[in-house]
Amino acid sequence: MKICVGLSGGVDSAVAALLLKRQGYDVFGMFMQNWHDADATLHGDCEWEEDRFVAEMTARKLEIPFYFIDLSKEYRKKVVDYMFDEYARGRTPNPDVLCNKEIKFDAFLKAAEKLGADAVATGHYCRRKETPLPDGRVLYSLLEGSDPNKDQSYFLCRLSQEQLSKAIFPIGDMMKKDVRRLAAEADLPCADKKDSQGICFVGKVDLPTFLKQKLESREGQAVEVYDAFYETDPLYRFTEETLRKILKEGAPLEMTAPFVLQQNVLTSDGEPLGESHFDEDALRALSDADLDMLARPFDYSSITFEEETYRSGKKHVKKTRYKDNPCGKIIGTHEGAQFYTVGQRKGLGIGGHKEPVFVIATDTAANKIYVGEGHAHKGLSRRCLRMDPSEVILMREDLRMEIGEMRRHRVRIRYRQPLQGATLLRRASGLYILFDTPQRGITPGQFAVWYTGEEMIGSGVIA
């Protein structure tokens, strides 16, 4: 079997190639260049050139053929343009997920096949399982990586059965420390190289600078939202009342997610998922309209500000100001709502608060961002999300949900988030995820991914 290893210049892909060669496979390495513009990176240099050099040195050390391919046109069209489009719509994309689906296991795979490869191997921390079917076909499953702090299955959530059939993950059952140990023992040139960060194949970037290549800057208002808004907001009251109806007796009514420091992601142990916090009959009784309301982000457009004139100083100079609004206050300006994302804390340029300030919503049409003070701000948390059926992909088509069906799964809505207990509800209007506990920063455009035990079942784009 001939295998092409996507050598990135990092330690993970290098050890993947090392293991495959030791196992007797016919291995060759290939490095792909996906980005040319160094102006957008924080370092201002061509990091890919150094990565290519290290990748080629690794191939020489392993005594395997090495190839180079430029996929920058495909990357810009399928990944970068997608990023610009999503941010322009006020959504937050995940370019790494699209890079794996459209580039690594599509354009790169096709190039490898032209060189005689039967499969492509990468340094992802995840595992693939094969299950023979009675009709002779093989069912491919994607499992979490064995290292709880490095599992990368989330980034592969959009792969198809065809793509999985040609994907190999040699280090998926290893711990990171053991990968580095093997690299050091084999004297690979990348043994001590730090893990890459930032956008896949672009590097660490200043996001507004990067986006300004296509998206125009426009000054807008930054509005702080106060607790008084939620006291009268119909959606907040509906959510609170509905949760009371569907929670099991004795289950706490939680409206905000507790703040916890970043922690390691714990892989599931295959044990049955814990009991739902909700009454099953009450969930079935929810209408599609009820679920749509529960999944709807808060709308802050009702917070308006009326100007008034007043006289100031000894000369009674006439000035204007905004009247006080108990629901919020204009506390600053920004360069464009499309440059911000829900949950963002850094880069706001807003001071004068005891606790951190977060973006809780963006409105690209009105060019406003809404912010809230403190980790416990009501606008940071939601209990339910919706995915359009057209944007749901299942790795296990045999587990497709029928309309009206409910299932329990573990779910994550971002990379490195510990898996969360949740109930999935399939309705004609969409697929809904109702979490056992409130979640911070549910962000339109990001991917929700669900698992049974260690196996990834499907994913969807958050509406």
Image (spheres, grey):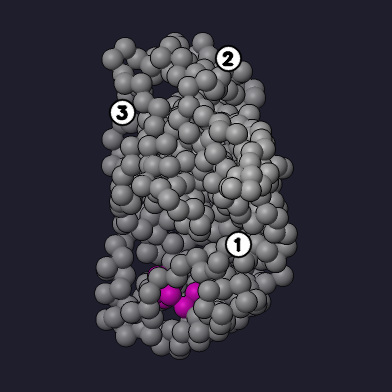
Cα gap from disc 3 to disc 1, whole angstroms: 42 Å
Residue at image position (31%, 39%) is 270
> Dot 1: within a 10 Å radius of its alpha carbon, few (fewer than 14), some, or many (20 or more) residues?
some
Q: Taking the image as drawn, is residue 412 in sight?
A: no
Query: What amino acid is at disc 1?
Result: Pro
Of discs 2 and 1, which sits in the foreground? 1
Position of residue 10 in the picture relative to residue 270 (left or right): right
Camera-side residue of 382 and 219: 219
Cα gap from disc 2 to disc 1, whole angstroms: 41 Å
Could you say which quadrant of the image residue 213 lies in? bottom right
Point out the stretch of residues depicted in magenta. 8-14
Q: Residue furthest front?
A: 314
Residue at image position (64%, 44%) is 316
Residue at label 1?
208
Comes first in the chain, label 3 or label 1: 1
Camera-side residue of 46 and 329: 329
Residue at label 2?
287
Camera-side residue of 198 and 431: 198
Residue at label 3?
274
Image vertical order of residue 116 relative to residue 453, above or below: below
Comes first in the chain, label 3 or label 2: 3
Q: Is residue 451 magenta?
A: no
Cα gap from disc 3 to disc 2, whole angstroms: 25 Å
Q: Is residue 13 magenta?
A: yes
Image vertical order of residue 325 relative to residue 15, above or below: above
> Dot 3: within a 10 Å radius of its alpha carbon, few (fewer than 14), some, or many (20 or more) residues?
few
Query: What amino acid is at disc 2?
Result: Ser
Position of residue 425 in the picture relative to residue 78 (left or right): left
Query: What amino acid is at disc 3?
Result: Gly
